[in-house]
Every structure is written in structure tokens, then in C-alpha cells.
Image (cartoon, rainbow, N blue to C red):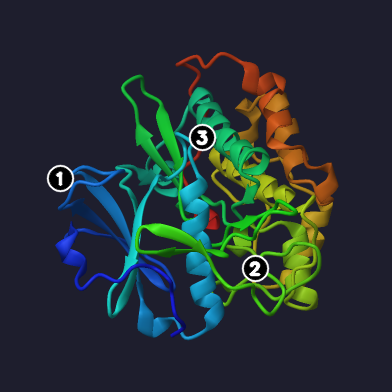
Amino acid sequence: MSHVPFRMERLMDRLYATDEILDFVGRGTYASVFKGVSLVDGDKVSKGSPVALKVFEKRGLSLDRMCQDIVREVEILRHLNHPNCLQFIDCFQTEYHIVIVTNFVDGKELYKTLRDGIMTEAQVRSVARQLLEVVNYLHSQVRVVHRDIKPENVLVTSTEDGGFHLTLVDFGLARTLSKGRRCVGDRLLSGNVWQLSPAPSAAPADSLESSYTDSPLIATPCGTINYAAPETVRSLVQSGHLATTAELMPRMDMFAVGTILYVMFCRKLPFQNRGNKVQLVKVMEVGPLFEEPEWRNVPPEAVDIIRLLLSFDPGQRPKASDVLQSAWFLKKNETGGVADFLPMTSQCEEG
């Protein structure tokens, strides 16, 4: 494994208490997430506070690029300051592990929320509005694209007024957009001080000005195929490389937002992935259909938004700020109006 410039700790349980079985939250390809409790007071967490521990096993990180992705994820998390984003607390390494510490969100994945019950139109609008607000923050203020927006990376917590509070998680695939700014991943943590690393000999990993082969941490150029934009799927079919520009990269996130909005209303994916990616691109080019009975109770202005977000041409997809100013999102969130939704189907499977 390559060197990771995070401070070294002898044991994780000197800082955070967790149980590998009882506190297990979930597992990805290279990391597992656990709920923990801080054993010390710090600048961003007090003793006894719950935290989330994203734990990477060093033995599974065999390539330099994998370590660069982890460093980049930490640097991006450090810059986030939004009520609908994870809050970075700490990062360190032990002899066998790399650990990223964030606040613990006591919520459910949006996928499970949809699977377990119905949502009113007002609840759908509220969740979508919060998602758009955090995406707008990422794109316009911190100049970051998430690249893996899907229901499994959206946590929702029930509120006292019957609504939901949304938190966008997992920035492992995120990239920066700003030109002229030192690339995320060039600032490295050593002890408690962030220092600049030596200039890389190759092109920066998150350059968006030309095609490149993306991180080995993922199976597709950008996230999960069920929520991937047409240009991502097409690139995968043609070469396995993603050729795009910084200007268009945020539109991939917007396509994923449109897919989630479609799923919240219809409980099905707009484009079915049958394993044939060439055919999937052709279906995407035709555009989404709104012929199922579930759409009868969906306002036409909401359908229009979804249709735009799922445009085959990325240049036709609106920005998050523009969608938030549309008539449907400016509606006051009434508490009534339960839509005649159908149960979650197997077609909307976890990505």
C-alpha cells in the first residue's frame, strides 16, 4: 500500500469506541462504516458524542490511486459546511487501517424509506428540495461534483412535523471543478497541520479537461449504473474512459437527481438496466415515459422538471439553482395530498 499522509495512532479504540458487530452500519467495496462514540474531547466533537467511522483496510489498497482517492475524499469533506452534508471530524491511520470520522446521522437510506412506506407529494418535494439545495451548494459554492448520487447515499431522518431531514453522504467519488485552484488531494494531513505535498509528476487525478480512466475504487466511470447519466454509460460502452468538461460534469449529478425524483414518484427506475448497456443508451435517448398509472396524481409541472433533468443532452439539463426556482418547488409544502403510490418494485433495486 502507498503512503497515506494522515497522522498515525497506535489503536483506534483509544479515540473511538465501537463494536464491530453491534455498531456495523454498512460495507462498500473497500470500506466499512461503523457507529462509534468519541472517547475524547476535540474541536469538532465532545466526549461521548456519536460519530460515524469509515474504515479502510490497508491490505485492500494496493494501488496509489486508491490512496489518492481517500486523501481527496478527506480534503473535500473538510471544505463542506452545509446542513444537508456530512460534517468532517477527524482522519487518521493505524498500522492496519485508515479511518475517516464524521458526524453520525441517525437516519435511513432513502431507498429503504421508499421501500417501507408511501410519501406525500409534499414530502417528495421537501426531500427533492433539500437534495437540490445541497447539490447547488456543492456545484456553485465549493465547486464539487458528487458523482454518486443515489438513494443509498441519501439518508433521511424523520422530523416532528411529519417531514424528513436529508443528509447527502459518501463523497468517495467526488471531484473538484475549480480551475486555477490547487487540486484536492494535494493538501495532506500530517499531525494536526495540513501541508502541501510535492507536485505530482502526472496529470492531476481530478482534471476534467480531457478523457481519463477513473478510479479503480468504482466499477463504472462515475458511480452506480442505475443512476448514471447517458454520457457516462456511453463512455463506458465505447472505451471505459470518461471524456467530459468541467462545465458539463455537474449535469451528471443533475441526471441522478432527476432519477431519484422519478423513483420517489413512481417507485421504478426510468430506464431499466438489463445488462445491455448499448441498448440502455438507446432507451435513454428516447427519454423517460410517464405512462404508468402512478403518474396520474403527479402534477404536470413536476413531470416537466423530471423530463428536463433526464434529458439525453447534458446541456439541456437545468442547474440546481434553476430547478429550485421552478413553480412546483416554490409551492408551499402542505401536509396533505397523499399520492396513490404503488409499493416499491424490484425494478428499483439497490445500486
Q: Which residue is mark 3?
A: 341
Q: Label 2 to label 3, Cα distance in Å?
A: 24 Å
Count of number-bearing discs: 3
The kind of residue on which mark 1 rests is: Gly
Judged by depth in the image, the label closer to the viewer, 3 or 1, is 1
Is residue 278 shown above or below 64? above
Residue 115 image position (x, y, % from top left): 42, 46
Element class at badge 3: loop
Q: Which residue is mark 2?
A: 274
Quarter of the N terminus within the rendering: bottom left
Q: Residues within 10 Å of mark 2 (few under 14, many from 20)?
A: few
Q: Label 3 to label 1, Cα distance in Å?
A: 41 Å
Q: Quadrant of residue 142?
A: top right
What residue is drawn where x is 48% and y is 23%?
A: 338
The kind of residue on which mark 2 rests is: Arg
Left or right of 84 in this view: 32:
left
Q: Earlier in the sequence, mark 2 or mark 3?
A: 2
Q: Is residue 182 visible?
A: yes
Q: Which residue is mark 1?
A: 48
Left or right of 28 in this view: 43:
left
Q: Residues within 10 Å of mark 1 (few under 14, many from 20)?
A: some
Q: Quadrant of residue 320?
A: top right
Residue 92 image position (x, y, % from top left): 33, 65
Determine contact: label 2, label 1, CB under 8 Å: no
Residue 216 image position (x, y, % from top left): 57, 77
Is residue 224 shown above or below 200? above
Q: Earlier in the sequence, mark 2 or mark 1?
A: 1
Is residue 114 shown above or below 278? above
